[in-house]
Amino acid sequence: MSMPADGVSVRAGAAAADPSRRQFLTLALVAPAAVALGSCSRTRTAATAPVYLSSAEQSFVDAATQRLIPADALGGGANEAGITRFIDLQLAGAYGRAERWYMRGPWPTGTDQQGFQLKYTPAQIYREAIAGVEAHCRQQHGKPFAQLAPAQQDEVLHALEDGEIELAKVPAKTFFALLWQNTQEGFLADPAYGGNRDFTGWKLIGFPGPRYNYVEEIGHFGQPYKQPFVSLLGRDPDAHEPGEA
Amino acid sequence: MARRLPPVDVVLVGFGWTAAIIAQELTEAGVQVLALERGEFRDTVPDFATDTIQDELRYAVRKQIFESPERETLTFRNSAEQTALPMRHLGSFLPAAGVGGAGVHWNGQCWRFLPSDFEIRSQVEQRYGKGFIPDGMNLQDWGVTYDELEPHYDRFEYLCGVSGQAGNLGGVKQAGGNPFEGPRKRDYPLPPLQRSASTTLFDKAAREAGFDPFPCPAANASKPYRNPLGVQMGQCTYCGFCEWFGCGNYSKASPQTTLLPVLLKKDNFRFRTRCNVTRVNTDSTGRQATGVTYVDIDGNQFEQPAGMVVLCAFAQHNVHLLLLSRIGAPYDPKTGLGVVGRNYAYQITSAVDVFQKERLNPFMGAGALGQGVDNFNGENFDHGPLGFIGGGYIALWNTGGRPILQHQLPKEAPKWGSGWKQAMHDNYLTSTSIATHGSVMSYRSNYVDLDPTWRDDYGNPLLRLTFDYQPNEHKMSDYLTDQATKIAQAIPGATHHAKKREGHYSIVPYQTTHNTGGAAMGDDPRTSVVNRYLQSWDVPNLWVMGASVFPQNAGYNPTGTVGALTFWAAEAMKRYLKNPGPLVTT
């Protein structure tokens, strides 16, 4: 299957012409690995290095997503499923840069029914929000989020979810919703994108993957489907480089 | 400065379902046709191949297959008192870009509207009296009847290879079909799709609740099928990646799987992609279209002269183009005068999630694999004591079990953490959801016009949508949800969670891509943009296709009716081309 190359250079012309794009283009360019992602293949060791997130941001995402989806008796959690890697790749790509979104001003605040009206891309929301959450944790607990006890981490996450922490530039609720959405995506998307490692998410629920033909099985009411889990990249997706949606 | 191109007989704006049908019909009549498509060329191979397309993240979540709001979007508000703001990313509805249009990513839920839907104002007045119609509701007859459209429904169903079970053949009720459907001259081209565990549960429960379930009509081929043009389709494999995806198996009807193999071979048909039409041009009288202006992907402007122009873009894009081109009087909500942008409508949906013990394997499904109930649609029931106009169907659609977006959790399940994991583990394979799909009437306060502030990539004002659900629609939808709940209650050992549609319309959560109106058809130029043949009242060589011509929306998915209306209009166009002029005089 083909994964599109990371489009940073393709977008450069448009970004230069449109000041609203310049800001997030810069963000993408400061992470050199993001530029390299689509242009050459790398070894598996290199693939685990962050492409957009700083190592401090990566520590936050590791810790926060592991509380959102913990490892427990039912199986692996966010860290086992590679969700930080998934989120990092998503933020480094077209999604992180909001390439398909309408990002022209002006930027008044709207009603809930009018939806997203922030001038920040998903990548920028993570950067701004994580800085805000870490500042909150240091002020309240004297430690970064990753070093808090699990119960304290849950408290912070609940406070974000309920909008009870004031972040400087983005609403806490917006960031929490985005983090939780991306965490679920990383747990349940095809392993081709770097998450759902070892089919952790699909094994939990019993989704077999993109199987092609159920003409026989659809009539076998109540029977388990017994074929092995499969990805768009086959039965061993971890042998491949993850791509960008 | 636009470069002027050599003229063509007919230019089509857009290259989805309606354009492909018009092109096929008019080229058969010997006319030279050009389609201009803003998106890319796409075909089953390689774009929808099964090793590529079965990707929930890329297509359903990141929405790679739909139009990109980055270049053009609309602004939205609930009422004229608010300031409309841009829809910055897709949500409530998902228009397409690219060859095949939304015909690539639809479910294939291919209904006929009820005879009463086309004559709704006459029927409501006759049955309940004029006073039954709420103030501010623009209820209108369509100017065309079910009987007139029946042969054209038939053509579309046989083109697509629709799988279904007739309920009314020539006025004789057929066991197992929809007892409420209008009379059809012959059966569906293919038998119904196989039933799944969940649609079987629904069927039994709906019978116990006293309703009349039937297999929903599906443009997903239940068997291999060769259509009247000789195009071969393959049997649906129930892969569960159907709506919001292209079909890799030639099983879901689309322009690509039914028409293009024939159309693209014709000498008198051409199409250009990445060409965005920005104006319909008219002569100095304003009564004759001279062609269109379009911008290509590099920003070059072209003028394409044509003897006839047909708008075949998505509903609101047709209306946007009429407004930008200053064709027809724009609707003014203050005076109620004007027609372009009037009659915008949508659909109102709700769901009843069902949690039970039997393994359902939801991932085995098809976009239009469903069992439905039509007891509460259109005029199939007495609205008198209920006090609302309209209705809808209730169905269990087993479209797939894609893990990110297609799972149900009980209301009390934790939103994240180990409790969420447990709930996902416990419910994914055994839960399902019953949908209601209801009509939305047109109102004086719901309309589209041009936005004063925000502009698209071409410097044109964005379309502005002013829309909210009205009390009539909430009342109707709540009633439908209560009926669906009765079905859920009849499923053995099940608990359920009824999710009524509450409050104001929101552009955020996906509901349905059944946006309608803005260029209504009808018998009266004071309340319609096109006549009953979809020909512009103002510019007789301009025609408008698609759901933009619906005067209000019925309780069904629109594509079957869009297809029938397109064949109906194509017949009229052939008469027009022999003897140009208005087909209806006022």
Image (spheres, coloured by chain):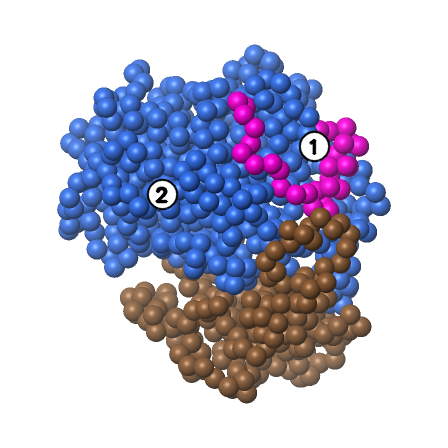
Chain colours: A brown, B blue
Q: Are marks 2 and 1 in contact (CB under 8 Å)?
A: no
- Tag 2, which chain? B
Image vertical order of residue B283 relative to residue B171, above or below:
below
Q: Nearer the viewer, residue B286 or A89?
A: A89
The relative height of residue A68 versus residue A43 in the rendered view (above or below) is above
Task: Give a yes or no on whether discs 2 and 1 share a subunit.
Answer: yes
Callout 1, which amino acid? Pro
Q: Residue at x 69, y 46 (%)?
A: B196
Helix, strand or loop for disc 1: loop
- Asked if residue B194 is among those painted magenta in the image, a careful observer would answer yes
Front residue of this view, candidates A99 and B561: B561
Look at label 2 and name its amino acid.
Val
- Residue picked out by circle 2: B262
Few, some or many C-alpha atoms within 10 Å of disc 2 (few <14, some 14-19, many ≥20)? few
The chain ID associated with circle 1 is B
* Left or right of residue B298, residue A182 in this image: right
Q: Position of residue B495 (x, y in %)?
A: 80, 46
Which mark, residue B213?
1
Q: What's the CA distance linking mark 2 and mark 1? A: 37 Å
Q: Residues within 10 Å of mark 1 (few under 14, many from 20)?
A: many
The residue under the point 62% across, 18% down is: B172
* Residue B385 in sight here: yes
* Chain part drawn in magenta: B184-212
The magenta stretch spans residue A137: no
Q: Position of residue B205 (x, y in %)?
A: 77, 37
Q: Is residue B398 left or right of residue B205?
A: left
**Can the viewer see residue A108?**
no
- Indicate the position of residue B323 as horizontal and vertical percent values: 32, 37
Residue B478, image x, y percentages: 67, 34
Q: Residue at x 39, y 54 (%)?
A: B42
- The C terminus of chain B appears in which quarter of the rendering? top left
Residue at 27% x, 24% y: name it.
Answer: B576
